[in-house]
Image: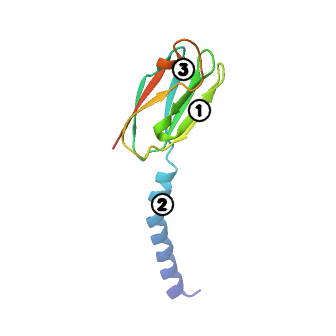
């Protein structure tokens, strides 16, 4: 074995690992999971705050009939059947306050069934 070749190769390998490991660790960080319960005619919680650029998963659970959650300004929509749970994964790319609306007609109070999403820096 030629040590003159092995040493630079080992240093190079160590450098590559040092350079890329932090990114790998960050990429594998679990997204922020937020559980939201939909029930005629509210979302609980009614307000959530997330960070811009940080992956988020909204775990939407229906406690009664079919519901949905749509953020038109963010281009996201998820529908849950009666008693079901579904996940909505997205990464907010702009800051601001976004009003999500139930996207499945669920009765007389459907129109006022809203959830406010605050996206902060
Ligand atoms: Cu509804």
Indicate which disc, 2 or 1, sits on the residue closer to the N terminus: 2
**Residue at the (46%, 52%) spot, across then down:** 26
Q: Is residue 2 above or below residue 51?
A: below
Which residue is identified by label 2? 21
**Residue at the (64%, 19%) spot, across then down:** 83
Tell me how far mark 3 sits from mark 2, CA to CA.
40 Å
Labels 2, 1: front one: 1
Q: Is mark 3 within 8 Å of ligand 1?
A: yes
Indicate which disc, 3 or 2, sits on the residue closer to the N terminus: 2
Pick the quarter of the image with the N terminus.
Answer: bottom right
Q: Which mark is residue 78?
A: 1
66 vs 32, nearest the viewer: 66
Tell me how far mark 2 sits from mark 1, CA to CA.
34 Å
User: Is 2 positioned to the left or the right of 118 in the image?
Assistant: right
> Element at badge 1?
strand
Tell me how far mark 3 sits from mark 1, CA to CA.
12 Å
> Element at badge 3?
strand
Indicate which disc, 3 or 1, sits on the residue closer to the N terminus: 3
> Element at badge 2?
helix
Which residue is identified by label 3? 38
Mark 1 Cα within 10 Å, few/some/many (few <14, many 20+)? Answer: some
Q: Is residue 83 above or below residue 59?
A: above
């Amino acid at each position: 074995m030629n040590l003159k070749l092995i040493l630079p190769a080992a240093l190079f390998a160590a450098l590559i690992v040092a350079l890329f490991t932090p990114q790998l660790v960050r990429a594998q960080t679990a997204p922020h999971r937020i559980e939201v319960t939909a029930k005629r005619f509210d979302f609980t919680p009614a307000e959530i705050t997330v960070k811009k650029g940080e992956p988020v998963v909204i775990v939407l659970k229906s406690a009664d009939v079919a519901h949905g959650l749509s953020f038109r300004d963010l281009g996201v929509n998820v529908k849950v059947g009666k008693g079901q749970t579904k996940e909505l994964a997205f990464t907010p790319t702009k800051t601001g306050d976004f009003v999500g609306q139930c996207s499945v007609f669920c009765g007389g109070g459907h129109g006022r069934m809203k959830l406010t999403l605050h996206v902060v820096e």
